Structures are given as structure tokens and as C-alpha cells.
Image: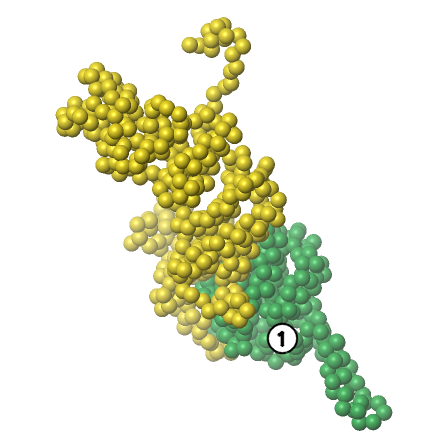
Chain colours: A yellow, B green
Amino acid sequence: MPLADALSFFPGLATAAAEPAEDIAALRRLAEWCGRYSPWTAPDGADGVRVEITGSAHLWGGEPALAADLMARLDRRHLAGRIAIADTLGAAWATARFAEGKSPVILPPGDCGAALAPLPVEALRLDLVTAQGLRRVGLKRVGDLSAMPRDALARRFGQIVTQRLDQAQGDLPEPLSPLGEAPTRRVRLSFAEPVADPADLLLATERLVEDLIPRLAQEGAGARRLDLGFHRVDGRVERIRLGTARPSRDQRHLTALFKERLDTIDPGLGIEDVILAAFMVEPLPPEQIGLAGHAPTNETNSIALLLDRLGNRLGLAALSRLDPRASHIPERASVYVPISVAPAKTGAQRHPAPVPGSLDPRLRGDDEIRPPWPIRLFDPPEPVEAFWLLPDDPPFRFAWRRRRHRVTRADGPERIADEWWRPEGSSAVDAIRDYYRVEDEEGRRFWLFRMGLHGHDHPPRWFVHGVFS
Amino acid sequence: MTDWRARLPELRERIRRIERPTAAVHGVLPFGIAAIDQLLPGGGLARGALHEIYGVGGDEEDGALAAAFVAGILGRLTTQKSSAGDGTVLWCLSRPDLYGPGLAAHGLDPARLVLVRAPRDTEILWALEEGLRAPGIAAVVGEVGTLAAVASRRLQLAAERSGITAFLLRRWRDGGQAARERNLPNAAVTRWRIAELPSLPTLGEPGVGHPRWRIELLRCRGGEPVCWEVEEADATGHVSLASALADRPAPPVPVQQFRLVG
């Protein structure tokens, strides 16, 4: 009924504007908070949360204890809810929404059929039309459905009915796709009372790292990506995400990296759980430990630690290497590659190796096939205004960055066309570049190119691609 | 009576060290050209110290000549047997326009570089300081614009402590900022300014000839300002003095001699 009518019935009705986006976000936060029980959580529809607790129930002392804990915490946050634990997702969904009885309801393992039989057919997550169709032919309960022949049901009402039935009874698998990535290792520390002191949080972090390292060491693996989650009392989760350039299980190093970022955490009214999850784990052979328990200061090791520190403050994408590529297009001949990508096999591609030449300039002939490369290359090339004699003389004057340059000497043209054999290359006239090495009156040397040829559709454009020394 | 004579060489050494505190603490890297090396204290570029380099005119924004100069020095540094670590060089910049083949042409193998991109000068200075503390690095290079004297002092101390050579390439956003900041004092041991000169035409051929530079040593701790004109470094990283137009550098000031008295 419209709001006005409702207000006329009950003048004291409490109303609030509906905010569906906020509701969805709040549900997501709740699902994230449920991550304290298990990393496999996801929002379910508009009013539920699914949690996969296989293998984590024993940490809480059994399923009844877990359910009681969850119930208590929801009560504390003034959230009314019903909890159901079952073998399959379908059975849990049905029991939570349609079963009578006090919540939480825990179905005994292995026997979903009997528990589901008295529930109405809507409990099978069927849409309204199908459910009404089933009711019209007299199938009102799930128990009635399981008694019917399956192909008759499928023919009359569609595959979805038998599918949902199988999923609820466990004959068809239905995996849960979790909210975030599923971690490979997880350690958790829960506090009896909420903690907000930074010193305590640091201690908790150290303890967790200490717990995780022996497990990694046992498997001969090191972590590349770690996520430290602080679950606050009010349901928000604060995270510190860490990445390392090489797999690491150095306790001091990881603790120091976390400690640097610990002051970005806002504990709010208190933290009740701290969870350390490792996402990417790679094999790491055992390293020799020096005397007194410290790792020997191996130089590659210390460079890796330096890269981790730089990467965690500036972002791992800020660290790169120059990698040569087989291409005669200048900007593709040498690319910036992130440091975490393994270097190419030696010998595959190399930058042009420095060739010792004669010191006396007169003896060093210009027998190099390619002209020397500039030391600065602009990406993208910067447009200039140039004046040149047709058809392909080097420019005699050009203007760049609001400065005029008069060219005194020039070399060129060297034609570099686009790589037409590549899918994104083109053989259009516009993609042809004629490169010139020019020197202006002050002695500055530039690498200019003209894109396109004169006489075709578009007038050719000039760019400066690099600066020589 | 002979007691103090025996201690004299030790006293001389101490006085020499007080006079030139950073000269040969970690050794020097010679340029390979007598005319340049003679005028640098210790016979070359001091290692384990902070050096500052910038360009002239438009090059204050692009930093091409400074980069080429540093690439030549680093090439020699990393190929020497006595260089520290495995020869990794940390190059911190804010604009990713360094070109690998260009570095190779000046003698520095780009495979040795680790590039760190940071948009702000403060972050670049922080990265330089972190790099100066890692024992495996051979040298660090930073392209900074604004440099506080305190920050440069910290870098110099860190370089002295670890023996890693640090180079600051000054690169500004525009000429105005450059004019304000290029003359500010800082703690670098040497300050170089590289300017381009019109090239010498190759015999009988039109076109751009062999590039020439003017290298000015503006400040040097324990030395005098000098100016040279050189041909561009070839791929071994050595510059050669332009034969036809060798500048006559100022005569070196004679070092004070202590005469034995008594």
C-alpha cells in the first residue's frame, strides 16, 4: 500500500528511505566479516550470507559452538537472523528460510532428504512461475517431488527442478564462489576483549607471522602475497596487503614490512580478530642460516629485501627493468618490464652490446649500419612544428615546447615502417616514419621523425622522439 | 729523539686525511684521460660519495647529457673487477624516458639497471637512501629537481658509510625553477655541468658529426673549478679530449708542503 495510506492507519509509523545500494554494500561487509570463521564466504541474494565451514568448524569446538558464537555476535550487532548448517548449500538455504523451529538449525550429516521432505517447494530456490505450476498439479512439498519420476518432472517443468533437487540432496555439486580470492594458508588470532592499542596489534602481527613461517618452511615454500585483516567490533575489516618481489619466509623482513604500514589501520572501537592469509605461495628452497640464527648477508638477498621495501612503499609496479625486444620500432625495442617478471633466458635478446671503439675519432669510421640511439626517448613522441623542403629533406627549422630551433646539420632520412605482420600493426602510409638526426645551432641533437608522406590524404606530421647526448 | 721521527709518517697521514676527508676513503674511479684525472683530487672521481650533475638550457628539463655522462661513468664502474656486489645499479626517476639502447651505446649494460619510478622528489630521495644502505648495489642514480641541503647531507653520509657511489641528476620542470635552484649549495662532493657543443664535421661528409661536450667541474671538494671540451664518450665509456680545441685548464694550485723543522 502507498506510504500515505500506511501513515493514515498508523500515524506513529517509523519510516526510512530505502537505499538498495547501501544495503548491498552492508551485506558484502557482513559477508567479509564472516570471514573470521572461514575464508569462503559470499553474500546470498539480498538478505543472506553463505559460509563454507568444512574444515574450520573444529577450530571453534564443533558446529553447535560455531553457530552459537555467530548467533551471539549477530545479537550484539542487533541483527536478527536465522542460521542453518547442512551438508549442501541447497539444504542449508531451504532450512534457514523455511524450516520451523528455533534457530540455529543443524541438520545431521548425511541425511538431507528426510529433513527437506516437509518443506514447501519454494524452498528449492525455484522461481515463482515454476513453484505455482508445481502447486497446481498438487506437488506442495519437497517430499512429493522426490517421489515423482524425474524425466516426467523435467519434461513438464524444465531441468531446473531436478537440478535444484539434486543440489539440495547432494547429488550435484554446487561449489561456493567466495567474495575474495581464496587464500592458500591462513592463521587467526582472536581476542577475548577488543584491542585497540597499536603496540598490541604489533604484537599480534608478530605472533601471526611467527605462526605462519614454520608452515611455509615445512613445505619449502615462500609467500609472495600476504593479506593481514583486522576485524573490527563494528563489522568492518581493515586490511594491509603486502607483495614481495621474490618468495620470502624471512620473519624479520615480513614483520618489518607489516610494521611500516601498521599505522594506516584505524582500529575504531576495537579489533576482535586478526587474520593473516597468504595468497600466492611459491617454492623456495631451504636457505642456509648463518651463525646466531641470522641469515647470511648474501648480496642478492639484500637486493631482494631492498626491492621489497621500495615496492611496498611505491608499489611493485614502480620497479622495472629494461628488457630488449626484437623490433625495429624504437619504442618497442626496449620496454620497461616489472621486476617481478622473470628475466628472459640469456642469449634470447640482448641490447646492442657496447662495442669498444677507437678513441681517436678520425679512425673510428662510420661503418655502423644503424645510427646511434638517443639516450632519452619520449613516450608518446611529442609533436613539433617543422618546416622542411619537399619531398623528404630534413627540417631546417622547428618549434618544440615553445622554443625555436634552427637546424645546422642533419642526418637522414631513415625509414621505419610499422610492423605490418603483427596484428596491431598497419601498412598504411600514415604509419611510415622517416627519422632524422638533427643538430641545432647550440649543438643540441634531436631525433625527429615525420609521420606520413607528402601528397597523400593527410599532411604529414612531425614529432620529436628522443634527445641525443 | 728518534721516537717522534718514527711517528712522523703517521702524523702526516692523519693531517692528509683531515685536509681531504673523502679523497681516498673508498678509492677513486679515473676517467682515463690524464688532463681530467690530474685535476681531480685523488686522481679520479671519488667513490663512496655524492656527485651532482646537470645540464644547460633545454637540457635542464631533459637531462640527456647528464644521463649520458653518468652512463659512461657507471659503465666503467660496473665493469671494474673491484666494484661492489654484482654490479646492480639503482636508477630512480620520475619520468620513464630512459632508453636502453642509448645507455648501451654509452657503455652501460641496461641489464644491470633496476629502475624505480616515483612521481615526487621526496620519494626519489627516500629510495636513494634505501639503496645506499643495501650492500649489493654498485651505484645509485637519482633524477631529482628540488633538493634540500639536509637531504643531500644525509645521502653523502650514507654513501660514505657504505662505499656506494651516488649520482644526482638534476632535472627541473622548467627554466624558472631551474634558475632558482641550480645554484643552491648542497653537500655533494663534486658538481658538474655538461653542455652540448656543435659537433665537429666528419671529414668530407655532411650531416651531424661526432658530438662534443663542454664539461665543467663547478665545485669540487679539495679541488678547483675546471672546464674541458671533450668528444662524446664512445662505447667503452671513455671520453677523449677534443684534439684540436683542447682547453687549457687553469694551473693547479700547489699543495702545501710541510717542511721538516728541527
Query: Which residue matches tag 1?
Result: B26
Expressed as whole percent of the image width and height from the top left, the position of residue B23 reads: 67, 75
Q: Determine the image quadrant of residue B51.
A: bottom right
Amino acid on which disc 1 is placed: His
B170 relative position to B76: left or right: right
Q: Is B127 situated above or below B10?
A: above
**Residue B134 appearing in the image:** yes
Expressed as whole percent of the image width and height from the top left, the position of residue A358 reads: 48, 78
Please tell me which residue lies in front, B90 or A363: B90
| Residue plotted at (29% across, 54% down) | A421
Expressed as whole percent of the image width and height from the top left, the position of residue A25 reads: 46, 31
- Name the secondary structure under disc 1: loop
Expressed as whole percent of the image width and height from the top left, the position of residue A28 reads: 44, 33
Q: Residues within 10 Å of mark 1 (few under 14, many from 20)?
A: some
* Image quarter of the N terminus of chain A: top left
Please tell me which residue lies in front, B259 or A133: A133
The residue lying furthest to the bottom in this view is B2
Please tell me which residue lies in front, A410 or A70: A70
The residue lying furthest to the right in this view is B262
| Residue plotted at (41% across, 50% down) | A185
Chain letter of mark 1 equals: B
**Residue A435 appearing in the image:** no
A50 relative position to A244: left or right: left
| Residue plotted at (27% across, 32% down) | A112
